[in-house]
Image: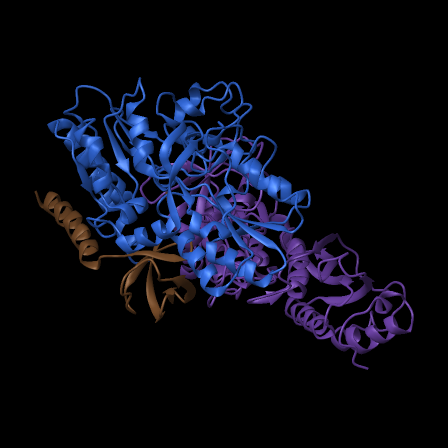
Chain colours: A blue, B purple, C brown
Amino acid sequence: MKYVDEYRRPDLVEDLVRQIRRRASGLDRKVRFMEVCGGHTMAIGRFGIASLLPERIELLSGPGCPVCVTPTTYVDKAIELTSDPSVLLTTFGDLYRVPGSAGTPEEACERGADVRVVYSPRDALGIADSNRQRLVVFLAIGFETTAPTVAATVLEASRRGIANFRVMSGHKTMPEALRALVQAPGIALDGFILPGHVSTVIGPEPYSFLAREFGMACCISGFEPTDILQSILALLEQTLTGEPIVQNEYRRAVRPGGNAVAREEMMKVFEPAAAQWRGLGLIPRSGLDVRAEWGGFRVEPPDPAVPSQEHASCQCSEVLRGRARPTACPLFGKRCTPQSAVGPCMVSSEGACAAYYRYGSVRFEG
Amino acid sequence: MSDEVIKLGHGSGGLLTRRLIEERVLRFFDSPALAPLKDSAIVELDAGRFAFTTDSYVVDPVFFPGGDIGKLSVCGTVNDLAVVGAEPIFISCALIIEEGFPSKDLERVLRSMRDAAMEAGVEIVTGDTKVVPRGKADKIFVNTAGLGRVAKWAESLRGAAQPGDSVLVSGGVGEHAAAVLAGREGLNLQGSLESDCAPLTDVARAVLQNANRVSFMRDVTRGGLATVLNEAVAGESYGIVLSEADVPVREEVRSICELLGLDPLYMACEGRLATIVDAASARRVQEAVARTAAGAQCRIVGSVTEGYTGSLVAQTAFGTRRLLQMLSGEQLPRIC
Amino acid sequence: MCWAVPLRLVEVSGQAGKVELAGTLREVGLQLISEPQVGDYVLVHAGFAIQKVDQQEAEETLRFLAEVFAGREEA
C-alpha cells in the first residue's frame, strides 16, 4: 500500500532504533513521553515499538482515545433513548461494547433495542433516509478529526431534507485537555507524541503552549513505525538539548494552519462547550455541541457537570494522566480484562490497560 | 407452476410440498438414493471407519461475492470431514425457509448446492423442507450432515504437537469475511473480492499423504487463523509463534482491513485449513498443497515453541512480538 | 485518534468521489478538502477525505530516512 508500506521497512526501523539507543546513552535519568492518540497506542502495541526502546525511555498512554474518555452518562443516555421504539441508534464500532453504568449498547441491542454499527456518519444518514418513520440518532464521538465529518453530514441532511436524522454530540477537543493534563499536580512528563490526524485539521499551532509554557518536548507523529520512532528520536533530542518546541514529523499530512476547510465546516455546525472527560473530569471549552441554529438535528447530550460513574477501585483516572501503570490497578487482569472491562482504559482496544494487557505480557519475553 | 415466493403451504407436507420438491429440488439434486423420496435414503457402504458431522448455516447476506449459503453449507460440512482424514461420500440437506422467500432465490441456493456437491464429489441423498411464518427465520437456514470414509492416509494424523513442528495455512486469509463485508449494506464497498469458499478434500489429502506426523488440522472459519491456532494451543504445554510477514493476505483484503481498522488474522475464511506437521515434512507438504486448486497460496507461517505455553504469539517484521488472544465477539470496524 | 488511511482518488463529482486501492472502490465525501483532483492521494477517515497527502513531503521524509540509513551503512 502506497504511503504505508514504505514507512514500515524493517531496515529503516532497525536503523532508527539504533540511533535512539545511541542518543539515549546520553541520558542521566529516565525520560517519559506520553502519546495522546488512540491510533498511536494501537500502532505502538501492534508493532511492538515499546519493546524496541532502551529502558531509559518510557512510553505512557494518555487520554487520547475518544472512547476511553466518553463518560458513562453518555452511554447511559444513548441506551435510554432506545426505550422509545421509534428510535434507531447508530454508532461507530468503537462505542458498541463500551459499558455505561448499566451495560453496553451491544447488550441493549441483544435485549431488543435497534442499534446499528456504521463506519461513517454518512451511512447513518443513509439509514435515516431509508427509514423516514424512525428517528435515527447518531452517536457523535471523536475529536477534531471526526467532528468535521459529522458537521458535513448534518449539512447534507439539511440540504436533502432528511429531518429524522439527529446527532448527540460527545465530541471533545484536544488542546484544552492537554492543558488540564499538564497543569494537574504530580505530573512527571518530558514530552508528548502529539496526535497525527487531529493535527491535520487543527495544525501544529494550538500545541505551542505545551513547549512554551510548560517546557514539554513535542512532536506531531504519523502512525507507521518509522514515523513514531522518528518522533521519539526528535523528542529525545529536544530533551537532551533542553530546547522544547513543537516539531512536525507528519509533514505529508499536517501542514501549518491545518485544514481550514474542515475547521470551517466543523464550526458551522458546532460550537465549543464544556465537556466531561472520563478519567479527567469536567474541562471547560473542551467539547463541541451542536449550535442552536441546527437544533433540529440535535439530541441534547447529558449534562457535562455530572461525572462519570466508576467502579470504586478503578485506577483509570491515574492511568490516563500517566500517574500510574496499568499493573498498579488492583482490578487489572483480575476483575478487569478486555473480555469484561470495568474502566475506560480497558474498554477500548486502544486504552492503556487494554494495550498493556495484550502487548505488555510478551514485551520482555523471548 | 411458478409460485414467485415460498408460502407456508410449501412446508406443510401436502401437495404444495410435493410439487416444490419434484419441480424445484429434484431438478438440482439427482441422486438415485434421493429420487424415491422415501423417509430415509438407503445407501450401501463397504466395511471401514466412517466420519459423521453436521453443521447449520445462517449466514447474512444469503448471497455474497463468490458464493452463497448453499455453497457454504456443502463445503463447510465436506471440510469438517476432510480435516479428520475422511473422504466425503453423502450429505443430507435440511432447509428452513421464511415465508415470502423468493422462489428464484431458492433455486439459486439449490443450484449452488448441486454445483458444490459435484465439485466436492458428494451425493445429496436425503433432505427436508420446512417453511416458517414471516419473521420466524431470517430468509433461509440450511443444515447439512455429512458421512465420509476415513482414508488410509489419515494414519499420519496422530500424536501431540512438539516444539519445532511447523504451522501451515493453505492459502490467503480473511477473504470470506472481506467479501461478506463488501456485500453487506452500510459499508458501501465495491470491489473484486470473492469468498474463498471451497472444498478442502484435495488439500487435506495432500497434507496427510505428505507429512510424517500431523498433530493438528482444522478448517479456518469464524474468528480466522488467530482463533483456530489459539484452539491448537489452549491448555497445552507448548505455544506457537506466527511470523506475520509469512501469512498470505491478498492486497484487497489488506486494504479493507486497513480502512476499517480490522486485523486480517481474525477475519473469517471458508476454504482454508491450518495444520501442524513435523518440521522435516513441512516443505514437502507446502509444495504438495500448493499444487492443488484450493491450496495454491499455501505457506509455512510459524512454528511450535517450548515457551509461550498455551499462547499464540505473532512476530512482526521488526522482530517484536505480540500476543494474539482469543476474541470475545466479532471484530467491529473502528474509526479510532 | 484516529484511524485514517491514504488512498488514491479515482473519481470526483462535486462534493463526492471514489477512492481506490488494489481493486476496491469506496465512496468518500470531499466537502472537507479544497480542489480535489483525480490522482490525488487523500487521507480517508469515517468515509470522508480529511486532507490530501503531500506527495512531495512524503517522498522527502522517505528520502531523508533512506539517505541517513545509506550514509550510516557506508560509514
Residue found 39% across the figure and 47% down from its top = A270
Q: Quadrant of the C terminus of chain B?
A: top left
Q: Where's residue B102, x and y in %?
A: 72, 71
Q: A236 and A125: which one is in front?
A: A125
Q: Is residue B100 left or right of residue A194?
A: right
Residue A83 in which image quadrant: top right
Count numbered badges in the picture. Answer: 0
Q: Where's residue A64, x and y in %?
A: 37, 36
Residue found 33% across the figure and 45% down from its top = B317
Q: Check the image and name the residue furthest to the right.
A: B14
Q: C35 and B99: which one is in front?
A: C35
Give the answer, above or below, for where C50 lies relative to A196. Answer: below
Residue A109 in view: yes
Q: Quadrant of the N terminus of chain B?
A: bottom right
Q: Check the image and name the residue furthest to the front.
A: A293
Q: Check the image and name the residue furthest to the left.
A: C75
Q: Is residue A166 left or right of residue C3?
A: right
Q: Where's residue B94, x and y in %?
A: 78, 61
Q: A39 and B59: which one is in front?
A: A39
Give the answer, above or below, for where A260 lies relative to A74. Answer: below
Q: Where's residue B179, x and y in %?
A: 52, 61
Q: Is residue B102 left or right of residue B64?
A: right
Residue B231 in view: no
Q: B17 and A71: which one is in front?
A: A71
Give the answer, above or below, for where A57 lies relative to B269. Answer: above
Residue found 42% across the figure and 56% down from its top = B254
